[in-house]
Image (cartoon, coloured by chain):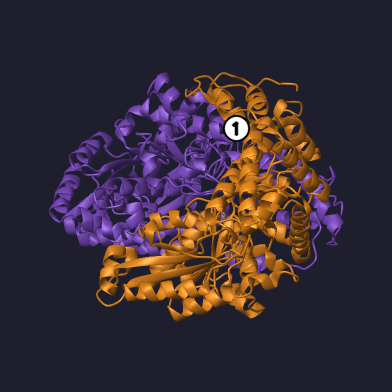
Chain colours: A orange, B purple
């Protein structure tokens, strides 16, 4: 690419120019930008190197800890980024990248992002965001309505009420979950009598005043790791995130939940929140939200739903019933950078009750003054960009019907892939898709047959081998760079909770075709024939024969 | 602008097209983008309406809580955004916008942001960020070195060490401060003997085990509001953020600090952290960091420096001495979206000791596994965008010399403005600039003279009037839209801590000229002659006469 060299001398004049002079049309950077505008997929395809370099190799290009004295030419930096950074990035938009929750973006998100960045608003206060604040309140209202379905009058009353908020905008689901639990914790220990509230006096005095020995959060064993982090941050402690066992569909066992609640109550531990998951990260399952709502009510606990992934399923008339009960949640997390197809860095938490947010409200003298419209008084973060512009545009340009199609095709494709796996002699479907996520593993038909009759000890041994093989296939496939599925470890009920490494697939990219899925499976089968795996498979063979002999 | 209409029917075909077909070159959105690329200042100038509309009016454009069923044309949404959102945005890049810390961006940040968004990496794990992870570690290393100035060998050892980190990337300074205090809190209550550590057992058991009745954080009364929020979140409670009085230069009073530490120790309250500020939000002052470091050492407290604003002063050979002692801090907050001139949404916290971060480390099965290079194991947030690309490019393209110039000209311009104010008969400089922030207020020379001899009661009365006038001028000037200064409330020592509303000015935009500053002051003087203020000034006149009579 051509490089129009900008000045590399730091004088005030040249610093001004950095702020005033646009990139020349023929500069390296302008050409990259133009390429992205005209052909995003082509740009990514051309510049991202498919075959994975070892990260310790890549690190060598980012080894210098010194900040250069002299300014560098923009074109030089652009070329460096293209050669060293872009080339070794992950092609998250590729239709064969089905391993994680980051997917392709609609084209229009790119120029809109440019408007957002050009305006460089700060949503903490209206003095640096003006119309972006009503816009953000509208976005919170739109998604609140998607969940809670109140009427126009309700939103006319609450949406722009400066003293309350229908939700808090966040940089992602982790902060959204943390914010929800922060609200739950503070609501549980309000100001009363001689006690000035947990916000002022802290957790320890709160427990003392209200006569508890601890405070707990209950969530299924499939809960997102961010909840443990939240419990740490909030001062509750990991050990008070109580994992509730799941049934064989990875859904919370309600009897176990109730028993645990009874135990906690007996031990004088305050149940801050019970969390239902709408789309578990690893398996995409939905907890029995209605039942959880009942238990939460019974034990006076805040009912939170982590719908970071599954929330947009509500757009689908065909599948929204899977989330039944979500409208009873006191708070709901949704990630816009997941199934709303917004760029990275946008999550939100919605509150059933617009006054909930007052439990975490805070003010300052120079901004977010009491009674102001500033949204910074009700968010965990301070300065924040105007991501609401992108969510708003997604909701308008894609619309309910568009999101419904995206959701439906994802779930249907997951079912199609599940069929492919079940019909394939070398793979075993471990968790069938409820939404658009499934897991499976390498497990030849004869091993599947043997596992049906194997002892627990034999099962464990077989699963150990299958786990190593699955892990090896996953890593090699990733390194080859044609396709990517992720992996995790599950303890399936059917195998007596014996640990199994599984492939994990997330089908959110609308451009992923059935042919691509077939070829991903085919590549995995080929990789199972690699020499490195041969010894493992011999061991497997021996174990399978043993089981067969023992049971005939 | 021309509008090439895209389909408004939600069928799968058209949804695919949203992901595959670029905006046409003549579409509304492409034209906006092109305008921004060629003439950012012109675009903002043309499309942002100067005169402020009342926010309750603006809200009417964002009143609909329904998500439309049918997709909307991209061009229609783009036009809506231009007419209703952009027009009522804040021109944060204007040279006459000197009220807040959000300023102009260097041109090259825009196309680079587009690359960042096009790649849509997720920095939580290398599987969705690859080279961005080493890049982020390099950025953390570069800024760590700016503060702690270790040699190449040190960074060769630590920068890319997967088991440690030199800092945590955040969405902004609030989360950076919260993260630092989270680290400080967890380091104070480690695993030991029968105690499994605060992370597992929580704050209450930690205090019990270690024999404390509470845990406190000490910061000057000029501390950022985010610290109270952090104390709330961490379960410590607002009341345990102990505000230390400041001297008449808004710097922490070290004797008061030491006395407070002694008191807390006597009360068996664990001092988690003492915070020094390098650039207070309201007045831009720097605490005596070396002295604070000594006290922190004496009382075994984590020494944190909130350099969200002032950190980049380290680039200036002329002014870096103001931050002397920062290299003794256990952790330091820097906001990249402030004086590193990166777009909104980028802060970081650096740790003196690369092992500090282990106090907040966490893992999961499917990502951020133990021993992985994933940076998500040491951040408060989960999914995060690749903002490191923009910080890296700023550091390279602007360079040390460039940032030095930007810092120097800001501080020098603040001094120039301070002179203008002091020479002006109608204004009083309240806090002279130490960095590039100052405050002043409307206060005619005769009132200034009267205040020198007035009783405390008279002083309070005069200040009440001056506060109302200053507030009124500030609001009207903002509404007129030619210029913007912010306001806050201070309690100057010189007036016996009587509350004063002041104008607050932040001089970070290199395009702000002395002429602009002169005209801002001139407009304020004109506004003081507005009819609404006349009654206030009559009262002032009466009070001033009373003081004069009483003292002659």
Tell me the quarter of the picture where residue B230 sits: bottom left
Residue A249 in view of the camera: yes
Q: Is residue B365 left or right of residue A34?
A: left
Residue B40: percent from the left, percent from the top?
67, 39
Q: Residue at x 77, y 31 (%)?
A: A46
Taking the view exactly as shown, the residue that stands out farthest to the left is: B266
Closer-to-camera residue (B122/B395): B122
Q: In this view, does B309 lie to the left or right of A209?
A: right
Location of the C terminus of chain A (image quadrant): bottom right
Residue B338: percent from the left, percent from the top?
49, 40
Q: Which residue is drawn at 69% across and 42% down?
A: A484
Q: Which residue is drawn at 29% across and 47% down?
A: B190
Closer-to-camera residue (A441/B466): A441
Q: Is residue A448 left or right of residue A11?
A: right
Label 1 sits on residue: B131
Image vertical order of residue B275 relative to residue B543, above or below? above
Q: Mark 1 lies on which chain?
A: B
Residue A342 in view of the camera: no
Q: Is mark 1 on a helix, strand or loop?
A: loop
Image vertical order of residue B448 relative to residue B550, above or below? above
Residue B488: percent from the left, percent from the top?
39, 54
């Amino acid at each position: 690419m051509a490089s129009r060299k900008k000045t590399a001398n730091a004088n005030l004049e040249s610093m001004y120019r950095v702020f005033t002079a646009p990139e020349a049309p023929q500069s390296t950077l302008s050409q990259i930008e133009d390429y992205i505008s005209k052909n995003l997929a082509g740009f990514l395809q051309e510049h991202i190197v498919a075959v994975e370099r070892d990260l310790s190799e890549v690190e060598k290009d980012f080894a210098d800890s010194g900040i250069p004295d002299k300014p560098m030419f923009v074109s030089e930096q652009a070329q460096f980024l293209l050669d060293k950074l872009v080339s070794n990035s992950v092609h998250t938009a590729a239709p064969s990248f089905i391993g994680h929750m980051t997917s392709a973006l609609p084209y229009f998100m790119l120029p809109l992002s440019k408007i957002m960045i050009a305006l460089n608003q700060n949503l903490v206060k209206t003095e640096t965001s003006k119309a972006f604040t009503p816009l953000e309140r509208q976005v919170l209202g739109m998604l609140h309505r998607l969940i809670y379905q109140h009427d126009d009058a309700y939103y006319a009353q609450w949406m722009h009420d400066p003293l309350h908020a229908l939700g808090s905008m966040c940089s992602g689901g982790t902060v959204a979950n943390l914010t929800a639990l922060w609200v739950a914790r503070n609501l549980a220990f309000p100001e009363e009598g001689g006690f000035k509230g947990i916000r002022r006096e802290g957790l320890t005095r709160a427990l003392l005043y209200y006569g508890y020995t601890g405070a707990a959060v209950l969530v299924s064993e499939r809960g997102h790791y961010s909840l443990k982090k939240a419990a740490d941050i909030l001062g509750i402690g990991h050990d008070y995130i109580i994992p509730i066992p799941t049934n064989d569909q990875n859904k919370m066992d309600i009897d176990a939940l109730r028993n645990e609640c009874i135990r906690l109550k007996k031990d004088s531990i305050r149940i801050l929140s019970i969390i239902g998951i709408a789309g578990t990260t690893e398996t995409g399952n939905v907890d029995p939200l209605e039942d959880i709502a009942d238990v939460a009510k019974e034990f006076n606990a805040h009912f939170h739903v982590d719908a970071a992934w599954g929330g947009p399923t509500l757009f689908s008339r065909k599948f929204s019933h899977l989330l039944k009960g979500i409208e009873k949640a006191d708070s709901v997390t949704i990630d816009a950078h997941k199934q709303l197809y917004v760029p990275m860095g946008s999550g939100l938490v919605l509150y059933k009750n617009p006054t909930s947010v007052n439990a975490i409200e805070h003010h300052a003298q120079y901004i977010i003054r009491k009674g102001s419209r500033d949204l910074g008084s009700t968010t965990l973060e301070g300065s924040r960009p105007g991501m609401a512009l992108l969510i708003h545009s997604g909701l308008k340009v894609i619309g309910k019907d568009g999101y419904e199609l995206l959701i439906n095709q994802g779930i249907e494709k997951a079912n199609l892939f599940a069929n492919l796996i079940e019909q394939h002699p070398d793979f075993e479907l471990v968790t069938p898709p409820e939404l658009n996520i499934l897991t499976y593993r390498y497990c030849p038909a004869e091993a599947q047959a043997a596992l049906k009759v194997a002892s627990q000890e034999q099962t464990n041994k077989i699963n150990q081998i299958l786990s190593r093989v699955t892990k090896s296939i996953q890593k090699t496939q990733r390194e080859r760079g044609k396709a990517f599925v992720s992996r995790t470890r599950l303890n399936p009920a059917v195998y007596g909770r014996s640990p199994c490494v599984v492939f994990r697939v997330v089908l959110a990219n609308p451009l992923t075709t059935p042919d691509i899925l077939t070829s991903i499976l085919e590549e995995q089968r080929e990789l199972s024939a690699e020499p490195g795996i041969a010894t493992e498979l011999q061991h497997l063979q021996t174990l399978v024969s043993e089981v067969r002999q023992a049971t005939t």
